[in-house]
């Protein structure tokens, strides 16, 4: 399969999947936990937060990458923060314009995207060292990974905590919601469960790969 | 250069740093202004719709809404009229909404109240009927109360049975005849008392205090003008 794809496409795909899978910000690097635990009480909130973060991450990665040769290394962190804060302000206004109900639901956590360590981490570790094209692909991959992670948390918490998904009732009126799931502790429970699932899966894959590698050597 | 500083990496001159930071800050400023200007109308429209929806909810028979300021000197002023081009409130003014039914008669008055709840300030919008001098109900503007406990104030049947709540003015019109008070669950004895939800006493108290404070401040100012408010202007 990979032979058919041109080398460049594979590279770009690899760069994208880096964030979605191998270095998933939430489940592998365990970054950005503040919004991940606070706003994921419903699937809609989680996806909106994912989109808002994606916007900030991608725009700031592009700008940092474009300006990377201009920014003196002594003031780089200050510069990144200014750039990130700018796009957070932009997204803040955009969400207010789209839906006030959503703005109220996400509350202070929109402004707090500015201190999401994942975004500053990407600007410092990746965007400042790579050309704009690659930086944006990497940022999009990370955003997708983060949004998937938030959605995984939000969906489980909404299903168990309210008996609904995207506001649609799943179990009928007799369902007694697990209120703890929409409270802060529920966020930790669900995150812990997902981390367990992902690490078990990762180990299982590793073991399978090792077994295959051993078989290939024997052959 | 044989001294130790010669081995340090070259420093960027301060002027270059200031220039770069200044340029980037200016660029970011432009982006923010553009975003603010671009979304301003949509945001204002959204806010207006949200308020109207809340007012229609607490004054169900209302068909149209007129916004007023009750000024500190006792006069009323329509929002957007009389010099104040924008909706910025004059100092000391209290904003309220007069809801009119389909015949243009005053159906009820709605105003915001706020008080400290369990997690954060609970902001509510409550209605007041001039004819009966009662508060028929309230809605939440913003609240961060615990889901499943404090947020029951708008769904708990026993709590909602506290309404309509007596909020009659004293004969001189200077304050409420009886202070609106939240009492412990099951001990409500008067129509101006609110029976708290067991387990959510703090949030229940916040509702009572929010209505009481806002009503004490606003209703005496409105009372002399009730006749002019009666018909839709």
Image: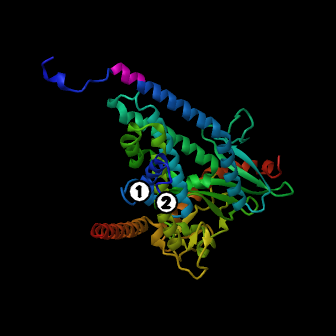
Where residue A119 sits: x, y (%)? Answer: 42, 46
Q: Earlier in the sequence, mark 2 or mark 1?
A: 1
A138 is higher (above) or lower (below) than A20: above
The quadrant where residue A130 appears = top left
Residue extending furthest toward the top: B1
Segment colored magenta: B14-19
Residue A24 placed where, x, y %?
41, 56
Queried whether the magenta region covers residue B16, the answer comes back as yes
Q: Chain of mark 2?
A: A
Find disc 1 in the rendering and name its residue: A24
The residue singled out by tag 2 in the image is A148
Give the residue at x 53% y 79%: A176
- At a point 59% along the width and 45% down the height, the residue shown is A94
Disc 1 packing (10 Å; few <14; some 14–19; many ≥20): many
Chain of the residue where label 1 is placed in the rendered structure:
A
Figure quadrant of residue A214? bottom left
């Amino acid at each position: 399969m990979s032979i058919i794809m041109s080398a460049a496409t594979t590279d770009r795909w690899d760069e994208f999947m880096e964030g979605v899978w191998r270095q998933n910000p939430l489940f592998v690097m365990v970054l950005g936990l503040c919004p991940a635990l606070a706003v994921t009480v419903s699937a809609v909130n989680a996806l909106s937060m994912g989109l808002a973060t994606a916007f900030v991450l991608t725009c700031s990665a592009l700008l940092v990458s474009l300006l990377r040769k201009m920014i003196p290394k002594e003031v780089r962190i200050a510069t990144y923060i200014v750039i990130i804060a700018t796009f957070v302000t932009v997204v803040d206004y955009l969400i207010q314009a789209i839906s006030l109900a959503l703005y109220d639901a996400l509350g202070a956590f929109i402004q707090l995207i500015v201190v999401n360590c994942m975004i500053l981490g990407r600007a410092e570790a990746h965007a400042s060292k790579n050309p704009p094209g690659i930086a944006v692909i990497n940022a999009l991959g990370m955003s997708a990974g983060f949004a998937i992670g938030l959605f995984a948390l939000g969906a489980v918490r909404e299903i168990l905590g309210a008996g609904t998904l995207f506001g649609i009732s799943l179990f009928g009126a007799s369902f007694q919601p697990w209120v703890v799931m929409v409270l802060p502790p529920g966020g930790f429970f669900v995150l812990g469960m997902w981390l367990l699932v992902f690490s078990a899966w990762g180990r299982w894959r590793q073991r399978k790969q090792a077994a295959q590698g051993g078989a290939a050597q024997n052959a | 250069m044989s001294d130790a500083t010669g081995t340090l990496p070259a420093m960027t001159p301060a002027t270059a740093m200031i220039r770069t930071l200044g340029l980037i800050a200016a660029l970011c400023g432009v982006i923010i202004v553009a975003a603010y200007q671009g979304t301003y109308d949509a945001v204002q429209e959204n806010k207006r719709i949200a308020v109207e929806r809340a007012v229609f909810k607490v004054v169900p028979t209302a068909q149209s809404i007129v916004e007023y300021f009750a000024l500190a000197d006792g006069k009323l002023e329509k929002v957007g009229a009389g010099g104040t081009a924008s909706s910025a409130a004059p100092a000391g003014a209290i904003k309220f909404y007069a809801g009119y039914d389909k015949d243009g008669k005053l159906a009820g008055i709605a105003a915001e109240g706020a008080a400290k709840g369990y997690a954060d300030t609970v902001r509510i919008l409550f209605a007041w009927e001039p004819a009966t001098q009662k508060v028929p109900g309230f809605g939440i503007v913003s609240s961060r109360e615990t889901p499943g406990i404090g947020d029951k104030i708008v769904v708990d049947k026993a709590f909602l049975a506290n309404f309509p709540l007596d909020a009659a003015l004293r004969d001189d019109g200077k304050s409420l005849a009886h202070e609106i008070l939240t009492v412990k669950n099951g001990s409500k004895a008067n129509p101006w008392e609110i029976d708290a939800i067991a387990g959510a006493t703090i949030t229940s108290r916040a509702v009572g205090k929010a209505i009481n404070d806002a009503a004490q401040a606003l209703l005496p100012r409105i009372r002399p003008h009730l006749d002019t408010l009666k018909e839709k202007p």
